[in-house]
Image (cartoon, helix red, strand yellow):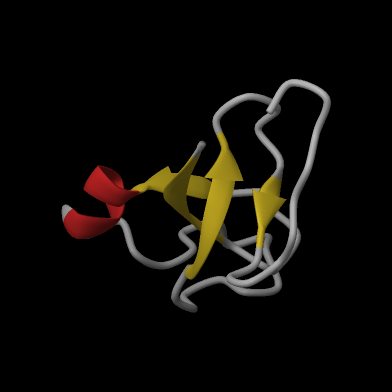
Amino acid sequence: MEKTVWVCEGGCGAKKTQEEYDSGKNKCGNPACANYGKPFEMRSECLSCRAVMKEGEEHACDTC
């Protein structure tokens, strides 16, 4: 099973839930990050192993 998360691709590792994204936390706020001020990108997160995948990316883990 998966859920939608929003992530920064600039290297800071920021990850927001759909609720956080909808409340306005939709871009990187870390001044030390290469993507500072840029919007987060939508991803899917496996609820079992917490792996984050791009849309359409296949995923299989031992706990799924």
| Residue at the far left in the pictured view | 23
| Residue at the far right in the pictured view | 62
- x 75%, y 50%: residue: 59
Q: Position of residue 2 (x, y in %)?
A: 50, 42
- x 70%, y 27%: residue: 49
Q: Position of residue 28 (x, y in %)?
A: 49, 63
* In front of the other: 46 or 26: 46
Q: Quadrant of residue 60?
A: top right
In the figure, 13 relative to 11: above or below? above
| Residue at the far bottom in the pictured view | 38
In the figure, 22 relative to 36: above or below? above
Q: Left or right: 57 with respect to 6?
A: right
Q: Left or right: 50 with respect to 17?
A: right
Locate the C terminus by quadrant: top right
Q: How many marks?
A: 0
- x 16%, y 53%: residue: 23
- x 30%, y 56%: residue: 25
Q: Left or right: 9 with respect to 15?
A: right
* In front of the other: 42 or 60: 60
